[in-house]
Image (cartoon, grey):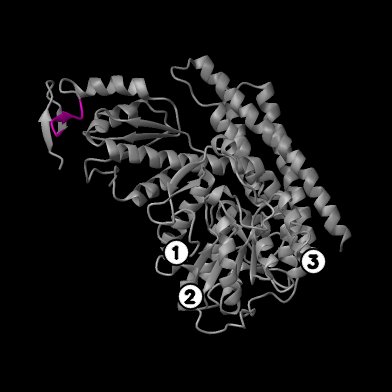
């Protein structure tokens, strides 16, 4: 039980004592706060202060920070402070929501723990720092992935726009179609032991398959109803090369960023498309190709996250996961017959920074990594966001513990939910468009080329102005400001802003303000930042224009 009392410092300022320990200086809290902030402040997008007390440190931090910086305060002791997030050690979800809403993927964060808080609530502070670390690590993974693959995904998007506009259907056509149980099969090591039961009850469920898990299913002559594909890398194309003949009755569900040659290879009788929430701005350029809806779908770090988001919208029935280990069960990476399957060595475990966390089975710790752990978090967020708690079952019978999901054996799930055959697992296709204007689709590429050409010219002008003029010239600053609005509009119209994300990330990281900069240092930093930004966007626009031109020529010849 905490004894919280208000007291007065020697200089007359109010302070707080908790169990006899002062949260502030008993002599001069304001002066102490000035010294503390000077020691712990460093420039960052978010100043994350753990511990508010009477607000002395917060007020000094507000004076010290740059105007573009934000302050997020987490308070583990005192309740009902305006604009401060109270952190209950029993409610991790609250802090996760606060971090998710306040800290964006590209934000840098400076974490400051107020004096004496660690002495008073040591376990809670450790929990908070752990949760913050996990959130920031998740953001790093997402940002690194975007930086590495954004251009590849953008090109996939444009190519997939052709197929989506020509013959495929928006994913919304699958919504609210069933009350049948859905099983989502993933490729974790535990999948193998569930295949016999899956095969026995195959005609009494809808089966969703996560990506390359298809190899393990087909090896047992189990054909899924839906195959999910979201990965944009060409390497995943190789997994499907030798199995296309077996999937004539399997419907493809794909993100617009997935590798564009997979769809034509599988030649499914039906295919459904969506765009992930992180790329929802691509809805505008898609309108150049088609009047079909480009629906967004929530997801996470794995294809199974997206499959789960669809399942929640697709059926009112219960949903079961199998093979969703998110852990290296018996040091294995995947189920049998998965092309990625291998056994990890002790050296690989250490090198990849694997760690143990709470497992599916009570009192069991399982070996996992940070990407797997973030996928687990994505499942939990999706479950809460779409009210899936009462109808989502983890039947993996191994691997990591996914909170919010109910753990039961797969056989038990099947016996409870599969009372009748559901041979007809088709959907109503009344919403599918009847006619397609192929000429409009090809014209969409021509329009994007024209818009990219306009963007290239504007960026070139900006680079030339920066090179030949001073940024102290108000006319130049006004010119760049006018061009920025034009650039943003063209980015939105073409979707190339997705490709520019890597450039933006470099700008945010490379040109951060330093402590106590001189006027000349500030000018040099701002000059270098502007030159880098416009010049890199100019070069990338030329490169992208060339790739889009090849697409345009290709699809024009196919007419």
Q: Residue at x 34, y 27 (%)?
A: 63
Task: Determine whether the residue tagged by mark 2 lies in a helix, strand or loop.
Answer: loop
Q: Mark yes or no: residue 372 visible.
A: yes
Residue segment shown in magenta: 18-24
Disc 2: which residue: 317
> In front here: 421 or 292?
421
Q: Quadrant of the C terminus?
A: bottom right
Badge 3 crowding class, 10 Å Cα cut-off, few under 14, some 14 to 19, many 20 or more, is some
Query: Distance from label 1 to label 2 (Cα)?
Result: 14 Å
* Mark toward the start of the polypeptide (1 vs 3): 1
Tag nearer the camera, 1 or 3: 1
Taking 451 as reference, is 476 left or right?
Answer: left
Query: Distance from label 1 to label 3 (Cα)?
Result: 37 Å
Q: Quadrant of the N terminus?
A: top left
Query: Distance from label 2 to label 3 (Cα)?
Result: 39 Å
Residue 457 lies in the magenta stretch = no
Are the residues flagged by discs 1 and 2 in contact, CB closer than 8 Å?
A: no
Q: Mark yes or no: residue 485 visible.
A: no
Disc 1: which residue: 386
Task: Determine whether the residue tagged by mark 3 lies in a helix, strand or loop.
Answer: helix
Q: Is residue 277 above or below residue 423?
A: above
Tag nearer the camera, 1 or 2: 2
Disc 3: which residue: 438
Q: Residue 266: x and y, percent?
A: 75, 65
Q: Residue at x 69, y 71 (%)?
A: 221
């Amino acid at each position: 039980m905490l004894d919280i009392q208000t007291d007065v410092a020697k200089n007359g300022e109010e302070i707080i004592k908790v169990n006899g320990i002062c949260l502030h200086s008993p002599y001069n809290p304001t002066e102490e706060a000035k010294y503390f902030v000077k020691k712990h402040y460093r420039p960052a997008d978010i100043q994350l202060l753990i511990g508010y007390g009477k607000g002395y440190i917060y007020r000094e931090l507000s004076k010290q920070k740059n105007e573009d910086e934000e302050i997020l305060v987490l308070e583990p002791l005192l309740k009902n402070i305006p604009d401060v997030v109270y952190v209950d050690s029993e409610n991790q979800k609250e802090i996760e929501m606060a971090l998710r809403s306040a800290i964006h993927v590209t934000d840098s964060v400076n974490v400051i723990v107020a004096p004496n808080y660690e002495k008073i609530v040591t376990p809670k502070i450790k929990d908070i720092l752990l949760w913050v670390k996990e959130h920031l690590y998740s953001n790093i993974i997402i940002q690194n992935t975007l930086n590495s693959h954004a251009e590849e995904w953008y090109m996939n998007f444009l190519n997939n726009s052709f197929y989506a506009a020509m013959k495929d259907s928006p994913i919304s056509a699958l919504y609210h179609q069933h009350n049948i149980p859905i099983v989502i099969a993933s490729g974790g090591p535990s999948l193998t032991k569930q295949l016999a039961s899956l095969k026995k009850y195959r005609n009494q469920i809808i089966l969703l398959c996560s990506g390359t898990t298809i190899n393990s299913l087909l090896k047992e002559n189990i054909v899924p109803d839906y195959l999910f594909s979201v990965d944009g890398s060409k390497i995943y194309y190789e997994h499907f090369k030798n199995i296309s003949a077996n999937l004539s009755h399997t419907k493809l569900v794909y993100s617009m960023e997935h590798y564009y040659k997979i769809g034509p290879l599988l030649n499914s009788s039906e295919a459904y498309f969506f765009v992930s929430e992180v790329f929802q701005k691509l809805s505008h350029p898609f309108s150049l190709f088609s009047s079909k809806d480009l629906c967004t779908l929530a997801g996470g770090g794995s294809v199974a996250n997206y499959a789960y988001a669809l399942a929640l919208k697709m059926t009112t029935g219960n949903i079961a996961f199998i093979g969703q280990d998110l852990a290296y069960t018996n040091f294995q990476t995947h189920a049998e017959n998965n092309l990625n399957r291998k056994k990890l060595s002790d050296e690989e475990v250490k090198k990849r920074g694997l760690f143990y966390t709470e497992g599916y089975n009570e009192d069991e710790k399982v070996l996992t990594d940070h990407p797997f752990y973030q996928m687990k978090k994505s499942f939990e967020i999706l479950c809460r966001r779409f009210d899936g708690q009462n109808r989502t079952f983890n039947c993996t019978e191994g691997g990591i513990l996914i909170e919010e999901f109910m753990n039961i054996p797969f056989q038990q799930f099947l016996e409870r939910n599969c009372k009748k055959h559901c041979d007809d697992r088709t959907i109503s296709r009344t919403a599918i468009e009847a006619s397609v204007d192929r000429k409009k689709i090809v014209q969409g590429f021509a329009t994007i080329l024209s818009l990219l050409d306009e963007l290239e010219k504007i960026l070139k002008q900006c680079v030339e102005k920066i090179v030949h003029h001073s940024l102290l010239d108000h006319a130049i600053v006004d010119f760049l400001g006018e061009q920025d609005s034009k650039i943003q509009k063209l980015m939105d119209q073409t979707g190339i802003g997705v490709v520019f994300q890597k450039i933006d990330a470099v700008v945010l990281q490379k040109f951060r303000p330093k402590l106590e900069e001189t006027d000349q240092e500030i000018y040099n930093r701002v000059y270098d930042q502007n030159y880098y930004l416009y010049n890199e966007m100019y070069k990338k626009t030329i490169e992208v224009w060339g790739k889009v031109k090849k697409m345009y020529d290709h699809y024009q010849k196919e007419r």
